[in-house]
Image: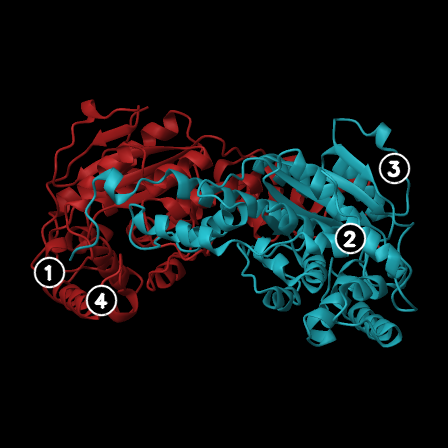
Chain colours: A red, B cyan
Amino acid sequence: MNLPSTVEAIVAGIKPVDRTWIEKARERTTQLVMPPRALGRLHGFSERCCGIQRTLTPVLDNKAVVVMAGDHGIATEGVSAFPQEVTGAMVRTFLAGGAGINAIARHAGAKVWVVDMGIIPAIDPRKVTGGHLFKISKMGSGTASLAWGPAMPRETAERAVVTGFTHAAELFQAGVDLLGTGDMGIGNTTPSAAIGTVLADCSLDDMTGRGTGIDDDALVNKRALIAKGLEINRPDPRDGLDVLAKVGGFEIGGIAGLALAGAYFGKPVVVDGFISTAGALIAQSLCSTVTDYLFAGHQSEEPGHRLMLKRLGLTPILDLGLRLGEGTGGTLAMTILDSAVHMFKEVMTFAEAGVSEKTQ
Amino acid sequence: MNLPSTVEAIVAGIKPVDRTWIEKARERTTQLVMPPRALGRLHGFSERCCGIQRTLTPVLDNKAVVVMAGDHGIATEGVSAFPQEVTGAMVRTFLAGGAGINAIARHAGAKVWVVDMGIIPAIDPRKVTGGHLFKISKMGSGTASLAWGPAMPRETAERAVVTGFTHAAELFQAGVDLLGTGDMGIGNTTPSAAIGTVLADCSLDDMTGRGTGIDDDALVNKRALIAKGLEINRPDPRDGLDVLAKVGGFEIGGIAGLALAGAYFGKPVVVDGFISTAGALIAQSLCSTVTDYLFAGHQSEEPGHRLMLKRLGLTPILDLGLRLGEGTGGTLAMTILDSAVHMFKEVMTFAEAGVSEKTQ
């Protein structure tokens, strides 16, 4: 199968979800041996999966989460509670199986696929032990600081999106049914807040929070840097690649590519928290149909996340106060989606169970 | 091991959760390679499990949900959208593996244990195929209508609680680590609303909702019947067995026994929705310490559920608009609790991962 090599070609291959499958699925739900839609949002989850996979027997067995990692020029300007070298150290922790996403993904039965989209250190994939999946797709050695000019050239932004698409394509072609998005990159709530401000059309102050836990002074500095970056760069809200190039990040572009791939291949994608949702906003601006294929894994503690999800038109599955990223919230939500699909396929109808329907 | 045979003896065997284990667990959480408490409520879940199981290596692998079934005299007085025979028909559906709880429990890896606490039909456990666990502990052939006098004698109420305890004891002694509560009983939102009104100390109107989906006229009737039952029976809010006997149900007493057993054996119990939470309120009124051992699986759509959970001091894990009962919401939440415990045990410390702690 020839894969598209430009964003334009990817978008040309995306079709809306087939509403007739959703209608057929809703009809089956009315027959399940329970009061009407008594399992609440689980019904909507299973019906959307029917629409996405164009079937009445959706399958989410084979799960994977892609953790996109990248460094950020702005990380050295006091926007994070952690030093920049933590990006690479955490990538090594993923590859050693010791981070939050590893534990949660193991429990969810999801494989973890880590991509170096442009972190500063060079980690040799041949030295990774334990069979972990690690891919090198460096777009650069960290982005430039968005406060002083574009974070990356436009061509690099497009390459980041296409690269994310290509990784997801490999997974879908290998049989993955349900993909989660994840991120690692010290400083990356800053580009994400910049993207959210532009694409969710809301105020910079509402969109910008404390990330990993900065204090009041650092928050003022972070907002000022984003304001300066938006002023200098003037990203065009109608042009997702322009926004990504000017105030984005390599891993955020990769995540946008994952989202587009779900839509292209007809597979559901569970979006994680603030950074992943910034990636989903880039994908939406490139192709509005993409949101048909997305689930919002959880409501992040980062305050702007709610505004991003509103722009995407997605309601989060979980709300557990998470603010880690790495794909943890999305992967945790996979078990809920998979349970909904099993429920849809396995619960008997009133007729099969020989139970009276509502009569009183 | 000799099991207690009275509520008094059960309560005498319950100790508070050991705070020192929770403190030790909180200390470990600070060392995990992530920003402080970045996985939000997952940390509290895992730390509470450490306190409950008195260990830093809690285990929730072996899961079971007990579905307590009973019929209700008041069910023939127009309080439900479904006819009374649906209770027995749904018990048969559980035993055939075809209900919502079966599908969700299979996916969660939880065994389903169904108890006839007093349904009207006699289902012969020897005729149950497929290896499903079915126990007969009939307290009667349905309760009496709470609108006209006590639902059951006080001795029966105590026997229902002790019976629930005994079933849970058998499961815990067989190695179950995490127990879920479930219910089946047409009409049982009515006794549950009555219990909630008395024990959560709030208005009958706030506590009483549409259950499986009754219309406005039926809701007026339901509220009037509960008001009449409370007026005639005058249940004593300081005496849980009096409340259970006068306005309760056999399966609700059984659920109270499950909750007490978790506290007695030092095992976490996940409470399902409105009916299960009424059972938990009975347990709390018998022994306030019991709430240390309980998790609220989800926020039900039944409006009074929020008020019940407030009285218990529990915050629900999930909020997905469920209103089915059967143990579905609690069992769905088990995967979140288990994931939290795996995370707690498996994530490396900063030192193990060689990652810098917060420094900027």
Task: From the viewer's side, name the closer residue of B297 and A28.
Answer: B297
Counting other residues with Cα less than 10 Å from the Cα at mark 2, is it few (<14), some (14-19), or many (20 or more)? many
Residue B303: image x %, image y %?
Answer: 65, 67
Please state the chain letter of the residue tagged with numbered disc 4 in the rendered image: A
Residue B164: image x %, image y %?
Answer: 76, 47
Counting other residues with Cα less than 10 Å from the Cα at mark 1, is it few (<14), some (14-19), or many (20 or more)? many
Tag 1 near tag 3, CB within 8 Å:
no
Quadrant containing the C terminus of chain B is bottom left
> Which callout, 1 or 4, points at the residue further toward the start of the chain?
1
- Residue B100 vs B37, above or below: the answer is above
Please state the chain letter of the residue tagged with numbered disc 3 in the rendered image: B
Amino acid type of the residue that numbered disc 3 sits on in the rendered structure: Ile
Residue B196: image x %, image y %?
Answer: 71, 67
Give the CA distance from mark 1 to mark 3: 72 Å
Look at mark 2 in the image and give the residue it sits on: B161
Quadrant containing the N terminus of chain B is top right
Q: Is residue A135 left or right of residue B299?
A: left
Look at mark 3 in the image and give the residue it sits on: B123
Of the residues tagged 1 and 2, which is closer to the observer? Answer: 2
Q: Which mark is residue A147?
A: 1
Please state the chain letter of the residue tagged with numbered disc 2 in the rendered image: B
Give the CA distance from mark 2 to mark 4: 52 Å
Give the CA distance from mark 3 to mark 2: 22 Å
